[in-house]
Each structure stands twice: as structure tokens, then as C-alpha cells.
Amino acid sequence: MTNEGTALDGMGSERRSHTCGSIDRSMVDQEVVVAGWVHRRRDHGGVIFVDLRDRSGVVQVVFRPETSTRAHERAGGLRSEWVIMARGVVEARSSDTVNSRMKTGEIEINVHEIRILNSATPPPFAIEEDAGADEAVRLRHRIHDLRRPPLQRSLTIRHELSRAMRAVLIDQGFIEIETPMLARATPEGARDFLVPSRLQAGSFYALPQSPQIMKQLLMVAGFERYFQIARCFRDEDQRADRQLEFTQVDLEMSFVGVEDVLEVLEIIMVESAREAVGVELQRPFPQMSYADAMARYGCDRPDTRILLELVDMTEIFAGSEFKSFRGVVDNGGIVKCLPVHNAEEISRSEIDRLEKFVRKELGAKGLGWVRVDAEGEWRSPIAKFLSDEERAAITERSGAGPGSLLFFQADEFERANAILSRLRIDLGEKLGRTDGREWDALFVVDFPLFEKDEKGQLGYVHQPFVAPLEEDIPLLETEPEKVRGTHYDVIMNGVELGSGSLRNHRVDIQRRILGLMGYTSEEAEKSFGFMLEALEVGAPPHGGFAFGFDRMVMVLAKADSLRDVVAFPKTQRGQDLLMEAPSPVDSEQLEELSIRVRVPKPE
RNA sequence: GGGGCGGUAGUUCAAUUGGUUAGAGCACUGGCCUGUCACGCCAGAAGUUGCGGGUUCGAUUCCCGUCCGUCCCGCCA
């Protein structure tokens, strides 16, 4: 019992007349009824102040014995987070007691009558802007965390964004159609969450990874413009920007080209950002090819506000005496450089820390570096391996001069780029090498349709239904690895928000692509039979995209993690620390589902 | 599956080279206080040092294992 000794009141016929944050000077002398949580209490013995909080804000209510002995007496027992309703008169504060840091700081409410609606256990951490508590504590006590302003703000932004997107899409002629959460398992893509069927013992539904296939079927069915704000599920390991379940703004349109889809995407983002947070994004969004993004930023989702750029040096080392770089190039790898000019402030020990970091965390073989000192001399562990011609070529390509610091990676294409891309972001932010823009939205386009795996087998880069560019269709027969896809990504502030493409609407091309990816026609039939069938009943040209709704909220709310824009998120190990999910279930439940659980016994 | 960082009171942190009674702020409990707004003052209570094992006369400290949180790689689009 948390309310021992304190009698609780009902609301009776009393109702709130105003929200806390809405009360201002204009209401002085008016009688109001406010309700909310005891944010803070300051008991001066004679007079008691309570900061009363509701969703709209905080207002100071005052209990004086001369106003109401009874209310004052009862207010003495109030504690943090108790729930009260108070009737009183709005009074202007004297000039020396105005609190300019509070929105309602010019007034206070002189309470005549209090109703104590509920008591509360003490909160595990302070309900304020910065919780200052460990994330595990915050997640275990999510209700208290949700009372804090940052989460109240981000969930409100989330709501506004959702509302705005829905409005724009409806305005653009899209209709909202729900698709099943109990769907069919697919061997492709991410690991499925499975749901056992009771009626079909031994069979399973899968929660949808996305409504991809279903929305294509809706296009074939003739809905022309579909959208859905859809929950999606992927049983893969988590990241700051990846939750097991997440929300996509999913849409698909018929009889369109890539530019039509991108235009809709732009309109949605611009309008909804304006509605949700008052941000004005510039249209049109710049477009960058995948090849360019990788070349300049080492990353297919560049934050172009960071001014540092990578330079390719592979050619220079193709015939080099410097064996470790040369060897990488001979094996098909690349040599890439991140030049940082005027880098005097990066100390030698900082370089050592960076090297340790890229080795330990990113799997780098090392971190080559060259520092050009004030006299133009090279201070570098690798300079002695380089010929004069190589040094000249490096200087020319990197634009190095006194004060420059060059970081090198010689490795496979993916890894060399990934490592330098990470350094680019870390150093760019640390050194403040940014262009000062707050928002950076762009499209990355011209992705290849296929990529080769270790065995040389072609596989899809995004998903198997992406259509090739029309002019590249002949290449499917001759040089399939050169076929460009119609895929595009939309990036904001270095976060991949969403992606889409045109889809294969011709069954012959879809079959050809599946064939190139190594599917026999039997396998193709088994995995995608109903899709292929759908393409044979009059499938219109169509395309669309899926947009990471949570991620956009995260970017707009300037949060670092999806957990800060989701009401009840899961930990990296997939647990809900509040509800304690997942959990074992009763054997009767399993029995009904014809399921027997086998968990490896601990040693 | 792998790597980095972290886990001590409700909470945030401290604790010398391994040393005897594990401290502090906030929160909490009690008391005082009629203008505070992170109120103030006085007093008090509060610990399985994540868990298990090992080394040692002695472990919060060193070692091994394990669990949890987080960031990253793999995975995922």
C-alpha cells in the first residue's frame, strides 16, 4: 500500500476545466479546475507549492492555510507523481516571484479544494528532461520514462508525422488497404517470426517482413494507388536503428516510372516534415548514383553535410613496391584514402586510438597514415615504402599540403570503404567539418541489379522483384552483372529512411532474373509461384517504396536510437523489460499447438 | 556467432598497490520552516558490490565462466 494514512477521493462530479499548460495571465481571477501529476512539491510549512503536470505542461498550484485549512493540510501529504485535481483561482504572481523559466511562470493557482485521486510509489528516477539513468532502468520503468519530456515530444512528433503522411497520401489519390499479419513464410530475405497454426497442426504462419508481395498483388488487382502504415517483423539482430518490429509507410503505384515515385516520396517527406516539426525540406532532393556515393563517401547512405571525402588510390599502388598495399590490389582489393586537411589538432595518440578502434571494432588490418608537417615533410610509418612518384601522385589526388593528415585503407572494396566511411563521419563530426545544414535529404539511385556472392553466383542486391532499367533489359542475356536496377534509396542525415523500385510486371523478365540468380524453374515455382501466376493475369507496370517510419521520426526528433521514438521498444536481445516478453508459456498452450519445446540444457 | 564499453544503496557515481566499519549527491522516511520554483535546515533509514567459481590470511579491486544493458561486425534492406 502506498496510500496508507491518506484517504483517496473520487472525482465525483468535478471535472477538469483547463489543462495546466494553457493557463496564462488573461485568466487571472478566474476559477479553474486542473488535474495532473505532482511534479514537485515544496513544503514551506506555512505555504505549500506544487508543480502540477499534465500533458500540456506544468503550472504552480499554491496551498495556503488561510485559503483552505483543509486543502493545505491534505497537500502536506502529497508526494511525487500522486494524481490530484485542484479547484482554485488563477492569480498573478508578484513581480519578485515570477518564474521566467516557466511558460506559466507569471501566474499560479490559489487552491480552495483538492481531490487526491491516487497515490504513487516513488519514481525510480527523476521525471525530467535528462533522466540520467541507465537504459536498462529506463526500459524496466518505461512508464516513468514515457512521462519525461523527450519521449512525450518524440511520440507526439510520431503522431503528427503519421497524420500528415496519411493526409498527403490520401490527397495524392492513394487508398489505404490492410494486409494480413498472419502470412506465409518465405525462404528469402530476413528470418521470419513464426506463428504456429492450431487448426493446421505442424504448419506455421509468418509475420510479414513487409507487405511487398501483397502490395504487388493489389496492383495486379487494379487498385493503382495503395498505401498502408504497416507493422513489419524481422527476426534479426538489433541495432540502434533496427528493432524486431517496426513501422513502414508502404506504398505502390501503377503505370509509373521512377520519377513519378520519387516525386511522391518527396512530397510526402516535405509535407510531413513541415507538419510534424515545422521543418522545410528543399525540393527537389539531390540524386546521387550508388557508384558516386561509394566513391566519395564509402557508403550508400552518405551524410553529405560532412565535408570530408574519400579518394581512390588503387591505381597508384597497382605496381607499387609497397608490398602490403600492392598485394591487396593484386587480389582485387582497393586502396582508398581519407584526407583531412589542417589536421594539426589530431594528436599522435589520437591516431593510435583510431587505429586501435578500426582494428578492434571494424576488423581493419591496420590504419595507414601520412602526416604532412609544417615544412611539407612526411611523418608516417608507411612513407619509407613509397617511391617519389607514388608520393607525388598521392599528393596530387588528395590535395595534401602542410597540416594534412591522410588515412589509408587497403582492403576489399566493402571493408575499406566501410572503415574509412566510419572514420569520415567520426572525424568530420569531431572536427566540425560540416556545412552547417540541419537537414540533408537525398536520393541514391542507379544501384546494380545483381551482385556476385563468394561462389560467383549472382544474387539480388535488394529483392528479387526489382525491375531492370528498360534500356538494360537486353543485357540480361549478355552481361547480366552490368544490368542496372530501378532501385532507389532515400537518405536523410546519413540514415537510410526508405527504398523502392519499379517491379517486374512481365513474367518472362521475372523468370529470367530468377534464373540468373540460380533458381531452377521448379524452385522458382515453389518460392514465388503465386507471384509468377499473378504476373500472368494482367499485371500493370508498377512500382513503389517502403519508408522506415520510425527512422524518420528518429531523425526529425534528433534521437540517437529507435528506442526513443517507440513507446515500448525491445532491448538488443529482443526483450521487453517492462512486460517481460518473450516468456515461456503453459504446456497446455503448447499442447494445443502440437508443439514440443526442446531447449539445450545448460552445462 | 564475434569484438568494444559498462554493471557497487531506489538512482547517479566514488572507494589509493588487494587491506580491516563500502562512501557521497539526488531520491526516500521523520522533524522544522508562509514565497518557493532543482526551496532550505536538522536527523534517519537504505548494500547478495549482477550471478557462480577460483587465487589469497584478506577480493568491489586480480583470474575464469556466466547473465544483463549498450555500441559495432556478421546478419538485416
Image (tube, coloured by chain):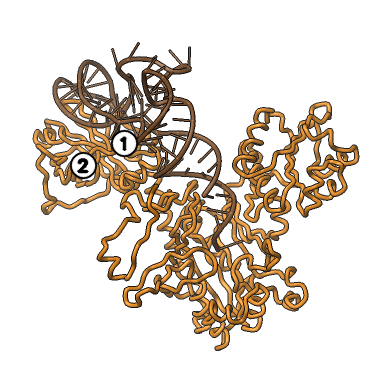
Chain colours: A orange, B brown
Query: Residue A119: in sight, yes or no?
Result: yes
**In the depicted structure, whether residue A208 falls above or below residue B26:** below
Question: Which kind of residue does numbered mark 1 sit on?
Answer: Glu
For label 1, the SS is loop
Q: Which residue is mark 2?
A: A120
Q: Which residue sits at x=35%, y=48%?
A: A577
Q: Nearer the viewer, residue A202 or A497?
A: A202
Question: Which kind of residue does numbered mark 2 sit on?
Answer: Ala
Residue A363 pos. (x, y %): 64, 44
Residue A538 pos. (x, y %): 56, 88
Q: Which residue is mark 1?
A: A106
Looking at the image, residue A333 sits to the left or right of residue A424; the answer is right
Residue A529 pos. (x, y %): 54, 81
Q: Nearer the viewer, residue A296 or A465?
A: A465
Q: Are marks 1 and 2 in contact (CB under 8 Å)?
A: no
On the same chain, marks 1 and 2? The answer is: yes
Q: Nearer the viewer, residue A559 or A101?
A: A559
Q: Which residue sits at x=82%, y=46%?
A: A326
Nearest-to-viewer mark from 1 and 2: 2
Query: What is the CA distance from the residue labelled 1 to the residue labelled 2?
Result: 29 Å
For label 2, the SS is loop
**In the depicted structure, whether residue A511 falls above or below residue A568:** below
**Quadrant of res A442:** bottom right
Q: Chain of mark 2?
A: A
